[in-house]
C-alpha cells in the first residue's frame, strides 16, 4: 500500500486536473478506447465502460480556471457551472474527448448540450433524457432506449458491441466502487475525524477522472487506512450538507464549514458516484434491464428529479436521522432553480422534524468564506449550547 | 396632465375579452356547477383532452403574467420570498404562489377554484416540474398526473418517443382524468375537437405569416401574444376559437386590402421603419411601455419565437383528428422550448430571411433559463448566418425589479440608430435590404 498521504495528494491532484491527464493517458494506450465526458448528476457509467470507454465526470472549472470566454456566453443570472465548461471546451481542456453526455437535470445543462452541438465539440453530444414516469414498462423502457442510443454513439466511433458479459463485468466493478464509497461514509459517520470532508471530496472527485479499476484500488486503501484510528476527535456538531449536487462548492467553502466546527457526515457533492443505492444485479442475461430497474427502484433523491410518491424532504430527514446528524446546511449554487425551488419545502420538513438548519448560496468560484464560516460557526455554537 | 389615450380595439379583441370573461366566470363558479378543475401549463398543454372530460383548465403561468400586467406581481413575489424562495428563482413560480397565498384572485377579480387535478404536462421547462412539486404540497391530497415530454435531442420526434408519450397518456393521464371527472374517455369527442384545433391553427398561421408582407399588417410579438391567447390556452379545440381566428383573419385581410400597418395601443403604425425578429418572452409588468418604445421608433416585430411556445404551427404541425393521442404527443414535443438549440437557430434564421427582417433582437428573461441559457450563442449564430445586426436587452417576466426602462430604451435607441445607419450604407451601396 502507498503511504496514505501520497494517496490523498494523488487524489487531490487528479480531482482538479482540468486537463484530465489520467483519462487522456488511458485513451492513448489503445486505439479503440474512447473518452466520454458527462455532466452532473448521474449517468449509468457501466454502459460506457462496457463499450471500451472511460466515463469522465466534468464537474466544472471551479475556482481553478479564469473564465473569460465563458462569461461572454452567459448572462449574469445564469449559474456558473456552464460558463466554466464552455471555457474548457473553447480552450484545449476537453480535446481528445470523443463524446459528451448532458443528463436531463435542468434547462441550463439541457441548453448547454445544444451549445456543444452548435460548436461541434466531440464526435457526439447527447442530451441524456430521464424518464419522469417510473413504471418499468413505460419509463423503464424509455430509459433503456436512452442507454442504447449512447451505446450506438460509441459503436459508431470504435465499432465495439456491448455484450452481456462486458456489461455484467462493468456493473460488478461499479457495484464495488459504490460499496467502497459507502463504506467510507459509514466509517466517517462513526469516526468523522479520521477523514475530513475535503479529503473525502478529493477521493471521490478523483474517481470520475480515472478508470474505475484504479479508483477501486484507491478506495480499498482508503477504507483500510481509516479503519484504524487517525486524527483527533473534536467537539463538533454533525451536519448534512445538501443542494450542491451539480455545481460544486469550492474546496475553501467545504473547509470553512469544517473549520467552523461542523463534521459533514453526509453530503450530495459527488452525488452521481453514489446515485444508485445498493448493488445492481450483475449476473443476469439482461444487464441493461438490471441497470434500468436500478435507476427506477434504487435511485437516491435530488432536487433535479421528480419525487412522485417519495418526497425529497422526508428522505432528507431520514438521511439526517440515519447519520445521527444535528442539523442541515442548505448549500445551493446561486441561480440553481432546482435546488432553490426545493429549499422552502425541504426546510419545512426539517422544521417539522425538529432539525435545525441554515442556508447559504455559492458560486463554484466564490472566493470569500468569512461570512460562511461565521454563519456555520454560529450554527454549530447554537446547537452545542442550546439543542 | 395629459389624458391617457384610449386604446383602439378591433372586433376580435372584444371577442377575446368576452371569451376570457366567460372562462374566468366559469372557473369562479366551478364548484357550484360541479365542474372539475385541472391546473396545467401552456407549453405542451392537453386542452382538448381536458375539455373532452368537461373539465376546466387553469394555467398558472397565465395567472402570473396577468398578475404582472395588473401590477400585482411585485407584492406576490415578495410574499413568496418571505416563505423562503430565493431571489434567484423563476418569478412566475413565486408570483403564482404569492397569488395563492393572497386568496387566488384571478384577473377578473373573481376567485380561482382549487385544483381537482394537477396535470404536470410540461414541455421544455424543468421549472414546471418544481412548480408542481410545490403545488402538490400546497394542495395536499390533490392527485397529480405526470406526462413526461421527451426533448427533441436529435432534432426530430421519433416513433419511440411518440409511443412513450401515448403509453403515459393511456396509463397515467387518462385514467386519472376519468377518476377525477367521473367520465369515460371519449375518443370521438376528442377527435371532433381536434378538427376545430386544426382549423384554428390554419387560421393562426395565416395571420402570423401575413407579416411576410412589406409593410406588415400585424405585429407578431406585442400583438402576437394576444393572437395566440385563445389557441395556447383554454380554447383550442372549441368552436369559439374557430370563430375568433376566423374573425381575426378577416380583420387582417381587410388591413392588407386597405394597406394598413399593424395596430398598436395608440392606433395604426403609420410608417414601418424596422422589421425585427424577436427571441424570448416579453416583459409583462411594463408591457405597454415596452411596446411603445418600439412603435414610437417605427419598429415592428415580424416574427417571434415566443409566439411558438404553445405550438410551432407555421412549421407545419397540425392536430390530427384520426390519431388524437399520437397527435397530442407530437404537439407536446414540437413546442418551441422543446426544440434543441440547432433547431431553434435554424428556425430563427429562416424567420430573418423569409420575413425580410432588418435585425434580430433578444429579450433575455432573468427568470427563464429554458429560453435564456444559450441565447448569446444563438445571437452569434444568427449574426453569422444572416448578416443582420443583432441586439440584446434584458428584463424579467413579472418581477418589476428587473425592468429598467431607461436602460432598455437607451439600448434600443442605439440599436435602432445602428439599423438606420446600416440602411443608409446599404442604400448607398445600391443593395436592397
Image (spheres, rainbow, N blue to C red):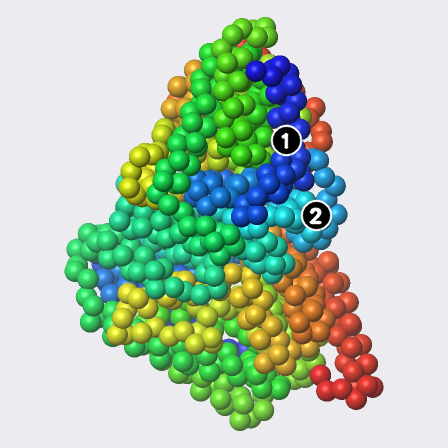
Left-right relation of B137 to B74: left
Is the residue at mark 1 from the same chain as the one at mark 2? yes
| Residue B242 picture location, percent across and down | 35, 78
Q: Which residue is mark 1?
A: A14
Which picture quadrant has residue A149?
Answer: bottom left
Q: Residue at x 65, y 84 (%)?
A: B270
Q: Tell me if I can see residue A60 in this picture.
A: no
Left-right relation of A373 to B16: right
Question: Which numbered circle lies on residue B294?
Answer: none
Mark-to-mark CA distance, 1 and 2: 17 Å
Please tell me how many numbered marks the rendered image carries.
Answer: 2
Q: Which residue is mark 2?
A: A92
Q: Earlier in the sequence, mark 1 or mark 2?
A: 1
Q: Chain of mark 1?
A: A
Residue B325, above or below A283: below
Left-right relation of B167 to B412: left
| Residue A252 picture location, percent across and down | 67, 26
Badge 1 vs badge 2, beta-carbon distance below 8 Å: no
Amino acid at each position: 500500500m502507498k503511504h496514505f498521504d501520497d494517496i490523498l495528494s494523488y487524489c487531490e491532484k487528479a480531482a482538479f486536473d482540468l486537463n484530465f491527464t489520467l483519462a487522456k493517458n488511458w485513451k492513448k494506450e489503445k486505439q479503440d478506447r474512447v473518452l466520454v465526458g458527462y455532466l452532473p448528476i448521474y449517468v449509468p457509467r457501466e454502459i460506457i465502460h462496457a463499450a471500451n470507454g472511460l466515463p469522465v465526470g466534468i464537474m466544472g472549472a471551479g475556482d481553478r480556471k479564469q473564465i473569460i470566454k465563458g462569461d461572454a456566453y452567459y448572462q449574469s443570472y445564469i449559474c456558473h457551472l456552464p460558463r466554466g465548461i464552455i471555457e474548457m471546451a473553447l480552450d484545449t481542456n476537453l480535446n481528445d474527448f470523443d463524446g459528451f453526455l448532458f443528463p436531463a437535470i435542468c434547462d441550463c445543462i439541457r441548453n448547454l448540450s445544444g451549445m456543444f452541438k452548435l460548436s461541434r465539440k466531440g464526435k457526439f453530444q447527447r442530451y441524456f433524457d430521464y424518464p419522469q414516469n417510473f413504471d418499468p414498462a413505460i419509463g423503464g423502457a424509455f430509459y433503456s432506449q436512452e442507454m442504447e442510443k449512447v451505446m450506438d454513439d460509441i459503436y459508431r466511433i470504435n465499432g465495439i458491441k456491448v455484450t452481456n458479459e462486458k456489461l455484467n463485468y462493468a456493473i460488478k466493478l461499479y457495484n464495488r466502487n459504490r460499496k467502497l464509497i459507502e463504506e467510507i461514509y459509514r466509517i466517517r459517520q462513526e469516526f468523522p475525524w479520521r477523514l475530513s470532508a475535503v479529503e473525502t471530496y478529493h477521493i471521490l472527485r478523483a474517481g470520475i477522472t480515472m478508470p474505475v479499476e484504479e479508483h477501486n484500488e484507491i478506495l480499498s486503501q482508503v477504507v483500510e487506512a481509516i479503519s484504524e484510528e487517525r486524527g483527533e476527535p473534536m467537539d463538533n456538531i454533525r451536519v448534512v450538507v445538501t443542494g450542491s449536487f451539480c455545481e460544486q462548492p469550492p474546496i475553501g467553502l467545504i473547509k470553512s464549514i469544517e473549520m467552523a466546527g461542523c463534521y459533514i457526515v453526509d453530503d450530495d457533492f459527488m452525488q452521481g458516484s453514489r446515485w444508485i443505492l445498493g448493488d445492481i444485479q450483475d449476473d443476469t442475461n439482461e444487464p441493461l434491464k438490471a441497470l434500468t430497474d436500478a435507476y427506477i427502484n434504487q435511485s437516491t433523491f435530488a432536487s433535479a428529479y421528480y419525487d412522485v410518491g417519495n418526497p425529497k424532504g422526508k428522505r432528507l430527514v431520514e438521511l439526517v436521522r440515519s447519520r445521527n446528524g444535528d442539523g442541515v446546511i442548505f448549500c445551493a449554487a446561486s441561480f440553481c432553480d432546482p435546488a432553490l425551488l426545493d429549499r422552502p419545502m425541504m426546510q419545512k420538513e426539517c422544521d417539522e422534524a425538529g432539525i435545525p438548519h441554515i442556508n447559504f448560496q455559492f458560486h463554484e468560484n466564490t472566493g470569500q468564506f468569512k461570512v460562511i464560516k461565521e454563519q456555520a460557526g454560529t450554527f454549530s455554537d447554537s446547537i452545542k449550547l442550546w439543542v | 396632465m395629459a389624458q391617457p389615450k384610449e386604446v383602439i380595439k378591433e372586433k376580435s379583441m372584444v371577442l377575446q375579452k368576452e371569451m376570457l370573461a366567460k372562462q374566468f366566470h366559469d372557473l369562479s363558479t366551478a364548484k357550484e356547477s360541479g365542474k372539475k378543475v385541472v391546473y396545467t401549463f401552456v407549453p405542451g398543454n392537453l386542452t382538448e383532452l381536458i375539455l373532452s372530460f368537461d373539465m376546466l383548465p387553469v394555467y398558472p403561468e397565465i395567472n402570473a403574467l396577468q398578475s404582472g400586467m395588473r401590477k400585482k406581481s411585485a407584492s406576490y413575489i415578495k410574499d413568496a420570498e418571505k416563505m423562503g424562495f430565493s431571489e434567484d428563482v423563476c418569478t412566475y413560480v413565486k408570483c403564482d404562489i404569492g397569488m395563492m397565498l393572497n386568496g387566488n384572485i384571478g384577473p377578473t377579480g373573481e376567485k380561482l377554484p382549487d385544483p381537482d387535478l394537477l396535470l404536470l404536462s410540461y414541455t421544455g421547462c424543468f421549472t414546471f416540474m418544481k412548480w408542481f412539486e410545490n403545488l402538490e404540497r400546497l394542495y395536499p391530497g390533490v392527485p397529480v398526473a405526470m406526462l413526461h415530454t421527451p426533448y427533441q435531442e436529435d432534432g426530430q420526434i421519433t416513433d419511440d418517443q411518440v409511443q412513450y408519450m401515448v403509453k403515459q397518456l393511456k396509463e397515467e393521464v387518462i385514467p386519472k382524468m376519468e377518476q377525477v371527472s367521473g367520465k369515460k374517455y371519449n375518443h370521438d369527442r376528442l377527435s371532433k375537437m381536434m378538427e376545430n384545433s386544426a382549423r384554428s391553427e390554419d387560421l393562426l398561421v395565416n395571420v402570423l405569416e401575413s407579416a411576410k408582407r412589406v409593410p406588415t399588417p400585424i405585429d407578431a410579438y406585442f400583438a402576437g401574444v394576444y393572437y395566440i391567447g385563445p389557441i395556447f390556452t383554454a380554447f383550442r379545440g372549441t368552436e369559439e376559437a374557430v370563430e375568433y381566428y376566423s374573425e381575426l383573419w378577416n380583420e387582417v385581410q381587410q388591413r392588407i386590402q386597405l394597406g394598413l400597418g399593424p395596430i398598436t395601443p395608440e392606433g395604426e403604425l403609420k410608417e414601418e421603419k424596422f422589421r425585427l425578429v424577436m427571441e424570448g418572452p416579453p416583459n409583462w409588468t411594463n408591457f405597454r411601455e415596452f411596446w411603445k418604445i418600439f412603435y414610437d421608433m417605427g419598429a415592428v416585430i415580424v416574427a417571434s419565437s415566443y409566439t411558438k411556445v404553445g405550438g410551432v404551427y407555421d412549421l407545419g404541425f397540425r392536430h390530427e383528428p384520426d390519431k388524437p393521442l399520437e397527435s397530442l404527443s407530437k404537439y407536446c414535443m414540437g413546442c418551441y422550448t422543446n426544440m434543441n438549440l440547432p433547431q431553434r437557430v435554424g428556425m430563427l434564421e429562416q424567420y430573418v430571411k423569409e420575413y425580410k427582417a432588418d435585425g434580430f433582437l433578444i429579450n433575455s428573461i432573468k427568470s427563464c433559463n429554458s429560453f435564456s441559457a444559450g441565447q448569446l450563442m444563438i445571437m452569434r449564430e444568427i449574426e453569422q448566418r444572416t448578416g443582420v445586426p443583432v441586439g440584446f436587452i434584458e428584463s424579467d417576466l413579472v418581477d418589476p425589479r428587473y425592468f429598467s426602462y431607461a436602460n432598455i430604451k437607451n439600448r434600443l435607441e442605439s440599436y435602432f440608430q445602428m439599423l438606420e445607419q446600416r440602411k443608409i450604407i446599404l442604400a448607398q451601396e445600391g443593395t436592397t435590404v
